[in-house]
Every structure is written in structure tokens, then in C-alpha cells.
Image (cartoon, rainbow, N blue to C red):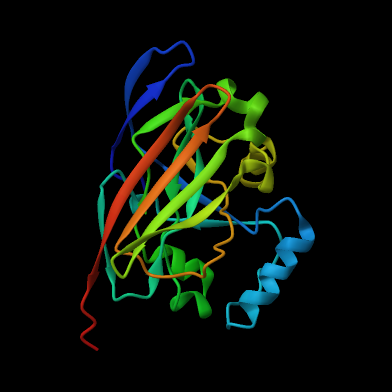
Amino acid sequence: MPGPTLHFECLERSGAVRYRSVDPRSLLIAGWAGRDPVAVQSHIEELAALGVPRPARVPTVYRAAASLLTRSDVIEVAGRGSSGEIEVVILSLEDGLWVGVGSDHTDRRLERSSVTWAKQLCAKPVGGRLWRLDDVETHWDQLELRSHAVIEGRRRLYQEGRLSLLLPPRSLIALAGIRGELPPGTVLFGGTLPVPGGISFASRFEMDLADPVLGRALTHVYDVIDLPEEG
């Protein structure tokens, strides 16, 4: 079922800007998408000790409702058991593949029972600007993901690292696509980075995908409203 219409500014390497409206048809979220298998296995063991089920295969792709995607700068969640995680996002449009930044916001309590259900429970904010994949693919590994979180009133660096830590775009597409391609309307989240200070609920989540080669960045910020838990 198609998700709500999303509006983007598509930025060409030349500096030209085009405005696009997209009706997403499919949302795919890559999991356990690190390039270092030893680090991935260590993370699986760490989460298993906390009660998170082991994945059936590594890497894997979780399917979620396209209706979860949002361009909003505010989301609502049940209680304070969820958290954001920055991810590079690949969008398949009629004129090719585009790159953005988003957050796979996930309910961490439900994650102990089912990762799929935990991902399905929360909105997935995405930034409003996109780059053409062809313009960044040759220096993909140099792109930098960085997130900050406001936790108990204090802003701190939450995640940071280059995309060289995660699977490259063609590997992600081969993993998630149909015959190695993403049909138009597909939105693919490309995996996230470790959280050195520990996963935490945050009232605000800030995302930045920086391109040091072309000297530009994609950003998005969203606030999180925790709804009361009445039982």
C-alpha cells in the first residue's frame, strides 16, 4: 500500500535543484549491514545478551509499511522506550536512484520480542533533500554519517562514522532488490552505526550526511513526543 506523498528537493552535482513529489510504494530496512563480519557478529552477541532475537540471516532486510515514512520534524511514540538511528537512504525514482538521510526509529522494548514488529511501530523520518547516487558513488566510502541526540536536556554526539563501515550501495540493492534492481517507489534504509554511549531515548534527534569531496551535507532534525503509557 503506498505511503503518504513525500516532497523533496533533488540536488544535481551541477547545482541545479528540482522539486519532486514521491508516492513511496515499498519500505525496506537493511539490518546487520556492516562490512566487518567480526564486528557484526560481536554486535549480534551483545544484543542477544539483552534479549534481542538473533537474525535468521546476516545481512538481512526487514520490510515495513511505506506509510511509516514521514517528512515531518515531529513524531509521536508510546512511552520512552524507543530511539532513533541514522541511516543513509536510497530512493528509487522514475529517473534513477537518489540518496538521502533518515532515521530508522525503533521501539527497543518490543525489539526483544520481534525486530520486525519493533520497526513497524515507529515513524521513519527522512530529510527533505536528495543527491543523485551517480554523483556520489565513486567516493561513497568517504561520505560521513553523524547524529546528535538531546537526552535529558543535554545534546551529545550519538553516532559517527564513514559509509565505509557499511555495505556499499550496489550490495544493498542486490540484497534488497528484485533481480538486482529497486523498482521505482522503493525506499531502502542502508543500515546504521554503533552507539558508543549506549542506546537512549532522546527528545530530539539530529542527522547529518556529509560529503567532504563535494563540500555539502544533507541534514534533518526531528523532535520526539512521548505519549503517556496508561497501561
Query: Is residue 167 in view?
Result: no
Query: Is residue 63 in view?
Result: yes
Of residues 196 and 139, which is closer to you in this image?
196
Q: Which quadrant would the C terminus be assigned to in this image? A: bottom left
Q: For residue 194, which quarter of the picture?
A: bottom right
Q: For residue 43, which quarter of the picture?
A: bottom right
Of residues 182 and 7, which is closer to you in this image?
7
The single residue placed furthest to the bottom in the displayed view is: 231
- Is residue 192 toward the left or the right of residue 152 in the image? right
Residue 134 place in picture, x, y as percent: 58, 21
Residue 7 place in picture, x, y as percent: 29, 32
Could you tell me which residue is drawn at 31 percent across and 70 percent down? 152
Residue 18 place in picture, x, y as percent: 34, 17
Could you tell me which residue is drawn at 33 percent across and 64 percent down? 154
Could you tell me which residue is drawn at 49 percent across and 15 percent down? 13
Could you tell me which residue is drawn at 73 percent across and 50 percent down? 35
How many numbered discs sit on the rendered protein? 0
- Is residue 43 toward the left or the right of residue 38 in the image? left
Residue 155 place in picture, x, y as percent: 36, 59
- Is residue 61 toward the left or the right of residue 201 in the image? right
Q: Is residue 109 above or below residue 96?
A: below
